[in-house]
Amino acid sequence: MAYDFDLFVIGGGSGGVRCARIAAGLGAKVAVAEARFWGGTCVNVGCVPKKLMVMAAEYGMATADSHGFGWQTAPGAHDWQGFITRKNAEISRLNGIYTRLLTNAGVTVFDAYASFTGPHTLDVGGQTITAERIVIATGGKPAVPEFPGAEHCIVSDDAFFLPERPRRVALLGGGYIAVEFAGIFAGLGAEVDLVMRQALPLRGFDEELREGLAEALTANGVRLHGGSAVTRVTEAGGVKTIHLANGTSIETDLVFAALGRTPATQGLGLEAAGVATTAGGAVAVGPHGATNIAHIFAIGDVTDRLNLTPVAIAEGHSLAEMLYGQGPRHWHIDRTATAVFSIPPIATVGPTEAEAAARATIDVYVSRFTPMRHTISGRSRKTLMKLLVDHETQKVIAAHMLGEDAPEIIQGLSIAINAGATKQDFDRTVGIHPTAGEEFVTMRSLTRQVGPQG
Ligand code: NDP
């Protein structure tokens, strides 16, 4: 049977766009459908505008810090609307770049919603389109809270378009989004409460980093409410009240629920194609994004595994190479670096100390110091760095950092760790002085040794 396209990608986010472009470059006849915004979550309501907002917050803090360096400027009132307008213009520019990348690669683009009507057939904005292979790359969306009063809460999609900077904000959750926006709003001058069910933020990250981040958030003026369960949210006269299970409550102006994300599979007509999903509603996939239907694949957040933009991109690229090129590309999922753009940020590659210690004897090197800038800025802030070394092989298996420029530093270190560098390789590397990063090559004294024996 002749199909309209060799490959149809549903979803024009980071993963879908990369998959489509690479497949087209390898000679396939490709189309992509995107109903909402080109570039997906990352470009529109995720990584990119979030980082611009973190930068906005950091400028305010840097203005205060500059006083220690002799500047006498006063931190002025922040022009929220002016900033959001410029941020939106930049995102529109990126939307255009994404569609141009596709059309320049010879990909047909549909500004339309696509859903399955059969295994090889899609309804694309009312048009019937057939494809030999189909890739589901529809991403995820913010989870909606289940407690009474959820309608009084915003989610991350809303946070990028607020008409004004709230005076008080309460963030629900202790994950990536909650801690990133706690930094943003606190840096922009809001009163911030962070309400989380764990004692510390960022469950799953190294315990020492979590403790360091809790201290840093507190130093930035964020009020932490660890071990708190929200029972309901009420609203009266514009004031929102968060009721907690321990009987206390928190008053605020904006309640921002950051309680995870759910895969965007509803309305896709997966049943018409017979595509299986997991209990959580994600598209169930095996190696290389294979679903239970041989010619249908899924990549990125819709598969709900490691929900990170670069992972979706790597999956999309690999899939296109597998289908039309030299075979799939390989990388170590457990050595994928990640960063949280809290203020200061966290970045990490490899297992946590507890995970590593459960498997083998580990040499742990820890350094904690006041970064040079804050020796005279007057700000109370510490940098924390950690290296985990397999005692037997002396390979560096993990690097963790909380502190300014952590994502930039860990990005470089992740190459060394993925390449299998040993502690001796780190030790014989000459540092760059004065930097924070040089600390990673000058950690001479063992902090402790941990292992399965405790
Ligand atoms: P996360 O999964 O990171 O965190 C969700 C938070 O909500 C956790 O603290 C979780 O607590 C809490 N939570 C979930 N359900 C409930 C509940 N019913 N009651 C109370 N607390 C609850 O989700 P985010 O929304 O922060 O971010 C979504 C994903 O997006 C991230 O996991 C990440 O993959 C991606 N992302 C990546 C970024 C980056 O790379 N910098 C930035 C932003 C997002 P508990 O820990 O107890 O489960």
Image (tube, rainbow, N blue to C red):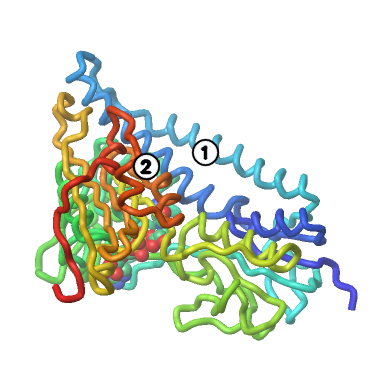
**Disc 2: CA contacts within 10 A as few (<14), some (14-19) or many (>=20):** some
Q: Quadrant of the N terminus?
A: bottom right
Q: Quadrant of the C terminus?
A: bottom left
CA distance separating discs 2 and 1: 29 Å
- Left-right relation of 422 to 319: left
Q: Amino acid at mark 1?
A: Asn
Which residue is drawn at the image coordinates 37% and 28% (left, top)?
A: 79
**Mark 1 — residue?**
88
Viewer-proximal residue among 207 and 420? 420
Asked if disc 2 and disc 1 are in contact, CB closer than 8 Å, the reply is no
Q: Residue at x 73, y 81 (%)?
A: 119
Residue under the image location 39 percent in, 39 percent down: 53
Q: Is residue 271 visible?
A: no
Crowdedness near tag 1: few (<14), some (14–19) or many (≥20) residues, C-alpha within 10 Å: some
For ligand 1, tell me if the residue under mark 1 lies within 8 Å.
no
For label 2, the SS is: helix
The relative height of residue 431 versus residue 110 in the rendered view (above or below) is above
| Residue 326, horizontal then vertical, whole percent | 72, 63
Quarter holding ligand 1: bottom left
Residue at far right of view: 2
Q: Is residue 72 above or below residue 220?
A: above
Q: Is residue 383 visible?
A: yes
Task: Choose between 6 and 183: the one closer to the eye.
Answer: 6
Residue toward you, 282 or 228 = 282
Where is residue 118 shown, x and y percent of the image? Answer: 74, 81
Query: Left or right: 126 with respect to 390?
Result: right
Q: What number of labels is visible? A: 2
What amino acid is labelled 2 in the image? Ile
Dot 2 or dot 1: first in sequence order is: 1
Residue where numbered disc 2 is placed: 409
Left or right, 329 with respect to 398, comes to right
